[in-house]
Image (cartoon, rainbow, N blue to C red):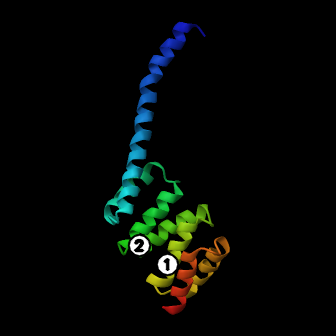
């Protein structure tokens, strides 16, 4: 291809590439905003930011699991379970989704019989994790 054609092609593609880079940066900022709101326990803000982010990147399992955790904190337990299930459908060993689903089922909804198999999976994944041990103790005592 002649240099003039390359130059013309580059000139045509430059705005497209620039828009793609801007969109990627915007999504990264949106995820950062969601994570910061989550860390600050601003659950509604985090939920909204994760929701917007996931409209564009629906397969980010960590963001989806964090969305579920926000929904749990907001008392939207069935919606939280839906998010955890979507994560676990793609990655059955996703620790955060599995842990949080166990919390919702066993502690929030009192469905211990549904939580126990999940707890067994958590123990298998991370047998020495103190959070798993504390969850097991909570499920026995509640």
Image coords of residue 96 (percent x, y)? 53, 67
- Name which of mark 1 and mark 2 comes first in the sequence: 2
Above or below, 72 against 17 in this view is below
Looking at the rendered structure, the secondary structure element under dot 1 is helix
Mark 1 lies on residue: 103
Residue at 48% x, 69% y is 82
Q: Which quarter of the rendered picture does the N terminus lie within? A: top right
Image coords of residue 77 (percent x, y)? 42, 75
Q: Find the distance from the CA under tag 1 to the CA under tag 2.
A: 9 Å
Q: Does 45 sit left or right of 2 as displayed?
A: left
Mark 2 lies on residue: 72
Residue at 43% x, 45% y is 28
Above or below, 26 against 135 in this view is above
The part of the image, by quadrant, that contains residue 2 is top right
**Direction bottom: furthest residue:** 141
**Could you tell me how many numbered marks the image carries?**
2
Q: Nearer the viewer, residue 39 or 74?
A: 39
Residue at 55% x, 8% y is 3
Residue 115's disc number? none
Looking at the rendered structure, the secondary structure element under dot 2 is helix
* For the residues bearing labels 1 and 2, Cβ distance under 8 angstroms: yes
The part of the image, by quadrant, that contains residue 72 is bottom left
Above or below, 127 against 58 in this view is below
Q: Does 105 sit left or right of 92 as displayed?
A: left
Image coords of residue 67 (percent x, y)? 43, 63
Mark 2, other Cα within 10 Å: few <14 / some 14–19 / many ≥20: many
Mark 1, other Cα within 10 Å: few <14 / some 14–19 / many ≥20: many
Image coords of residue 66 (percent x, y)? 45, 63
Residue at 34% x, 63% y is 40
């Amino acid at each position: 291809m002649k240099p003039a054609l390359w130059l013309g092609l580059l000139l045509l593609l430059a705005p497209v590439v620039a828009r793609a880079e801007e969109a990627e940066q915007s999504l990264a900022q949106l995820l950062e905003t969601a994570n910061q709101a989550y860390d600050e326990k601003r659950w509604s803000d985090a939920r909204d930011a994760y929701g917007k982010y996931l409209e564009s990147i629906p397969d980010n399992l960590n963001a989806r699991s964090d969305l579920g955790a926000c929904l749990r904190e907001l008392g939207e337990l069935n919606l939280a379970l839906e998010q955890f299930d979507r994560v676990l459908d793609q990655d059955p060993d996703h620790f955060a989704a599995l842990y949080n689903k166990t919390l919702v089922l066993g502690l929030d909804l009192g469905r211990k019989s549904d939580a126990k198999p999940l707890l067994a999976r958590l123990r298998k994944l991370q047998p020495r994790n103190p959070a798993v041990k504390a969850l097991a103790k909570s499920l026995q005592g509640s």
